[in-house]
Structures are given as structure tokens and as C-alpha cells.
Amino acid sequence: MITLRYFSPIFSGSLFFIFGCQRSGTTLLLSILNAHPQITCVDETEFPSPYPFPSAQRLAINKIARHYLCFKMLEHSHKLDFLKRFYPNSKILWPIRNPHSTISSMLNLVNSQGDWIDRCVITEIERLKPFFGKELENWHLSELSKVELAGIYWLYKNQYPILLKSHGFDVLEFQYEELIQNQKETLAKITNFLEIEWSDDLLNFYQKILGNLWQEVRGLTNQLIQLELAIYREN
């Protein structure tokens, strides 16, 4: 059975993580880095907890031709013991977004169960209590509004890199707004941190996304054509 641990001896120093507070541009960062010809990125939506995750099978079977592997795992960033045991040498990228924009995005991410704050913020705060329990108790969380809870979560979640660094992890914190406004400069800082050669493909990541969409559309079109031909032959 293949689990996340499977990749530890295979990639050792060439695996890195994207962590951070939810709604802070981590998905955008993943899309950009995935355009790099030497990086394969896996989003958290591809592997539900617990392990193993479906994409582990795909990655193992393909044997990953590229040199670096990136996991975006926001919900697992608190698993310090796991990271220390299996990925002590992995580097970590941590984007930080303006709290007002972050909370606004949380409120706008709505499904049938409510917005992101309604669905997730209490669970996420519980994950931080082993590290910031005393501080969080002082806020009397049960008396706070949902927006205030989101603000508390943003505050303490973005203090977690300090804890990671104190345990020997190499963490690069940067502003999400800088990634938007000074894209090339910020991406150069990221590739230098990761010790990965620069590629102009990072600045044209949207072309890869559009190309993948076109491949999906073309595949669906071919399936429809085959279906129509089969129906025609039967008639």
C-alpha cells in the first residue's frame, strides 16, 4: 500500500511543501510552480485524509520524470512529528495574504453547508490548540463572531512558521500580494530558496492550464464522436 511516506526515501531533499492559511493564494502558487518543467505538484484535493491518497498511485506508477515534487497540504501542516520523522529536510513555502482579503475570500467560498468559516474554522482552530492552547484560551472563543474567529485563526496559523523554524525546517514566508504585483521578482526568490533553476514557464503558467483544458475538451469530443458513430452503426 502506497502512502505519503513512500515518497520520503525517493525524493528526500527534492520534495517541498506549500503550507499556509486557507484562502491565501496557495492554489495559485501551486498552479504557477506546476508549470515549471522540473516540478510536479499535487494538490490537497487529490488526496483526502487519511493516507493513502489516490494520486499516490498515479505518481508511483508514472515514476515521476521530473526532478522535484511539491505537495500542497494545508490541512496537514500541523503534523509536526510526522514531518520531522519523514521529511526533516524538506523546504516549506508559506504565502501570507492580507487578513481582510483572506477573510473575505473565506466568506465567499460557499456551498450548501455555508461559507468556509461556517464549515471549517472551528476544526482548524482545534488543530492549532496543541501549539497555541494557552493563548487561544485567553480569547474566549465561544463569545466571538465568525469573522472574529476567522481573524484569530489567521493570526495563529501564520505564526506556525516560527514553530517550524524552531524545529529545524527551512521556511520561506512571503506576501501573496507581492506574488501578484511583483511576480517575477517573487518567483525568483522562491526558485532561489528551493535551489531550482529559473524557468520562464513560471510566468506563462496559464498557458499550461489552458492546454490541459483543451486536452480534456478534445478527449471528451472524441468520446462523443465515437458514441455517435456507435449509435449510427446500430441504426
Image (tube, rainbow, N blue to C red):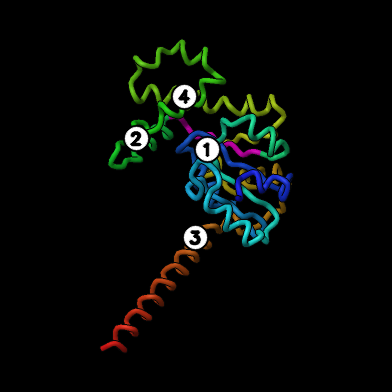
Q: Quadrant of residue 58?
A: bottom right
Residue 209: numbered disc: 3
* Whether residue 83 is situated above or below residue 204 in the rendered picture: above
Which of the marked residues, 2 or 1, is nearer the chain's N terminus? 1
| Picture coordinates of residue 28, whole percent (x, y) | 50, 47
Residue 107: numbered disc: 2
Q: Which amino acid type is shown beneath numbered disc 3?
A: Ile
Q: Which amino acid type is shown beneath numbered disc 4?
A: Glu
* Whether residue 188 is situated above or below residue 217 in the rendered picture: above
Is 41 on the left-hand or right-hand side of 8? left
The CA distance from mark 3 to mark 4 is: 35 Å
Prevailing secondary structure of the magenta residues = strand
Provide the residue designation for mark 4: 126
| Picture coordinates of residue 180, whole percent (x, y) | 52, 44
The CA distance from mark 2 to mark 3 is: 26 Å
Residue 74: numbered disc: 1
Which of the marked residues, 4 or 2, is nearer the chain's N terminus? 2
- Reply yes or no: does residue 98 show up in magenta: yes
Q: Which amino acid type is shown beneath numbered disc 1?
A: Leu
